[in-house]
Image: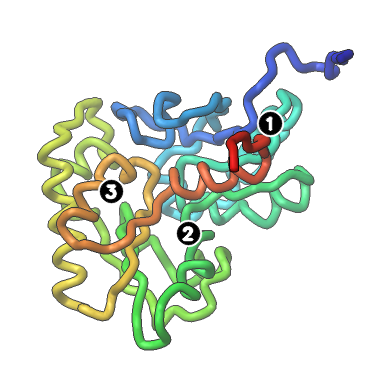
Amino acid sequence: MIYYAKPGQVSYGEAIGIILLDSVAPFIPGDVANATTYSFPVRFRRVPGLTVKRILSHDLTALDAVLEAGLELKREGVRAITSDCGFMALYQKQLVDQLKLPVFLSSLLQVPFMERLIAANEKIGIITVNSNALSEGILELCGAALPGRIAIQGLQNASYFSSAFIEEVGELDFKKVETEVVAAATSMIKKDPTIKLILLECSVLPPYGSAIQMATGLPVFDFVTMINYIYSVVVKNRVTGFM
């Protein structure tokens, strides 16, 4: 077999590119921004200056910087591009149009698929970093056509979560954050028992998905479920076995 170098590419084998916010937090295993979360190599690219505060304010002036990060990842050979923030949905359409690669910037892109897994009188419960910032406009950008079938629970008043990921103090108490996130999930379902699926909007939430499922008994979707799914379609492996 003969292999050929790709112009401008100095390393190979990273199919998934991940655009990162400019944030400071302990990104633990299971988090989108921790490479050990995946069973395959990934490539990261930070967007300088795109802070949590800016993305939660729906700052469209960061579009060019996000696009440049995507272009760099494309030049480096990735096959598909995601991000570490569900609110990156703000830039989804523009990056799809410009990059000519599969782009799936927001975990919320799973909502249209999830809507079809449940009955018409049932709902999807979304746990988000900030419920005030998760507008119908953001959901519409992700193709969520039926806002009446969605319940939203924010974590902006969860003190340990906010300290680690909004105030960015540089410290994370895993068990205390897990307790807050599980409490948010169970409270949401207690208020609305028609919730049958849970989606974790924020990229720091997948490490708590197992505890949420144990507490609620419900299927839990998150950024990592989406990334693994897309990887499986851009890198197909031959199946070996026997009959």
Instruction: Give the residue type that dot 1 points to.
Output: Val
Q: Are marks 3 and 2 in contact (CB under 8 Å)?
A: no
231 in relation to 111, above or below: above
In which quadrant is the C terminus drawn? top right
Element type at marker 2? helix
Q: Which residue is mark 2?
A: 108
Residue at image coords 33%, 60% = 219
Q: Which mark is residue 66?
A: none
> How many numbered dots are placed on residues in this image?
3
Q: Residue furthest bottom?
A: 121
The one of 242 and 205 positioned closer to us in this rendering:
242
The one of 120 and 203 positioned closer to us in this rendering:
120
Q: Which of pointers 3 and 2 indicates the residue nearer the eye?
A: 3
Residue at image coords 36%, 87% = 121
> Badge 2: few (under 14), some or many (20 or more) residues near its Cα, within 10 Å?
many
Judge from the rendering whether residue 49 lies leftward or rightward of residue 31; answer left or right.
right
Residue at image coords 22%, 44% = 162
Whole-percent x, y for residue 238 in the image: 67, 36
Instruction: Give the residue type that dot 2 points to.
Output: Leu
176 in relation to 77, above or below: below
105 in relation to 118, above or below: above
Element type at marker 3? helix
Whole-percent x, y for residue 174 in the image: 17, 34
Whole-angstrom CA distance, mark 3 to mark 2, is: 16 Å
Element type at marker 1? loop
Q: Which residue is mark 3?
A: 209
138 in relation to 45, above or below: below
Q: Which residue is mark 1?
A: 78
Mark 3 or mark 2: whose residue is earlier in sequence:
2
Whole-percent x, y for residue 67 in the image: 68, 40
